[in-house]
Amino acid sequence: MTQTTHGVEPVRAHGGLRRLRRGDLQSPKELSASVLGKANFQSVLQVEIERALQDDLTLLVAGIRIRPLPGHDQTALAGRQLPDELLERIRSVHENIKVVVVSAEELLLLLPSVRRRPDGEAAVNHLIEVLTPPLVVDGLDHHLSPMIGAAMLGHESPSAELLVDGANLALSECDESNPAMMFHPYQRVRQERRADLQSDLRAAVLDDQIKAALQPAFNLESGELVALEAFARWNRAGKGPVPPFEFVALAKDAGVGHLLTRQVLEQSVDGISRYQSENPDTFRPVTLWLNVSPDDVSHPEFPRLIIDAIDQNEDITIGLELSPSPDAEARDIHRSLKRLVSRGARVAIGDFGIGNANLTVLQQLPYDAVKLDRALIRQIAGNSDAANLVGALIEMADLLKLETTAQGIETESQLDIVTELGCAISQGYYHAEPTSTNEELHQWFTR
């Protein structure tokens, strides 16, 4: 059975679907499918828990996230009304499902008196099946993009609060590849560890314990240093270094996302400027690339942060690397990026060639560079298909007059291939690991 990267199995049909569809699930006759208020849901759920325990049955609670309905009356939605077609789809899974409208994009469901776990898993799969087709809104197809997290009675103490919390935990781990997840107790352990990490991260950022490290990028024709990419480094007190992928995305939830970005940028600009003043004969202008998220760009203080960095040193061009995502295409993001480009910043698409990159955005937004994804570069040696794909991406970028950087170069053979394919710039551990020492900077500038 396929596992997610978190080690929790996504929902798969384990049987029971045929019994589910013919209504062969035990349910008390006095309950009918309806939309409840949140307070009523909790009380109904607690009654159903006690009934299931008495009858040696189980039950299922599911949290469902959907795309908000365009133009739908949010006041009506808050008043527990759902479009008839959407409610009928939910009822088609089983007539005794109870529904709570939590928000414009979140529902809670209760399927009472389920015989066994496979029946609950079948119900979740059926919900994904009936909610996946688009809903017609004002004559237009609206894709709900459902994600479902579910919890079944039996894993933990029999309380309504724990079941709802378990469903929400499972929902938080859903993604496009695994849109439905069943709760596992380890998710709660992982949540507690995440809360501890978040607390320590917040303290570390507020105490200026996050350090910036720089990695060089070299022009493949001249061999000269042309850019430096800034990375955040955190040595957690008493527990050693924490990988950036574990804490950078967590900074927003810890309430210190913008402060972390500011510290990394300011430390990097100060470090390069210090080297420049000490080594004026070897220094030459460079681009300093900073990885940013849509949340960074939309922060009200972000434009001033970047403009101040631009004004601090005219020999350092500030580059903003933004990975493709639906949020990155929002209009306020566009406006902010265009404003910063007009003040001298550069913008690159990160992780190019994989994920959600919308090629039309390359012409609509002020991008002047692309960073080829490390996962693609890792495959090009000995894989002609991967090499051909990278070559096609480089050709396309050239046609659009976009500078290309091959990230993640770790071997000489990878370097030879991207050079032969016409890539402009190379970056990776083959050249150097990220560091902040003046000695390393001197080696890179005098290479």
Image (cartoon, rainbow, N blue to C red):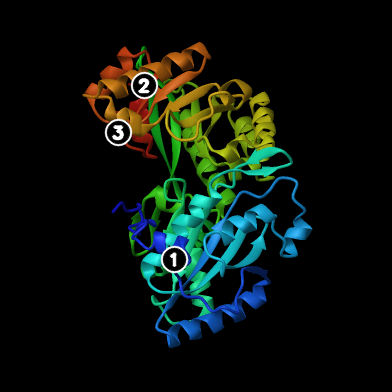
Q: Name which of mark 3 and mark 2 comes first in the sequence.
A: 2
Q: Which mark is residue 191?
A: 1
Contact between marks 1 and 3 (CB within 8 A): the answer is: no
Q: Which residue is mark 2?
A: 390
- Please give the name of the residue rendered at 69% of the width and 58% of the height, measured from the top-left corner: 82
Helix, strand or loop status at disc 2: helix
Q: Which one is nearer the viewer's eye here, 281 or 321?
A: 321
* Separation of residues labelled 1 and 2 (CA atoms): 38 Å
Q: Name which of mark 1 and mark 3 comes first in the sequence.
A: 1
The amino acid type found where label 2 is placed reads Val
Q: Which residue is mark 3?
A: 429
Outermost residue, bottom side: 54
**Residue 416, percent from left and from top:** 26, 18
Q: Of circles 1 and 3, which is in front?
A: 1
**Residue 79, percent from left and from top:** 75, 65
The quadrant in which residue 409 appears is top left
Helix, strand or loop status at disc 3: loop
**Residue 109, percent from left and from top:** 56, 66
The amino acid type found where label 1 is placed reads Gln
Q: Is residue 415 left or right of residue 153?
A: left
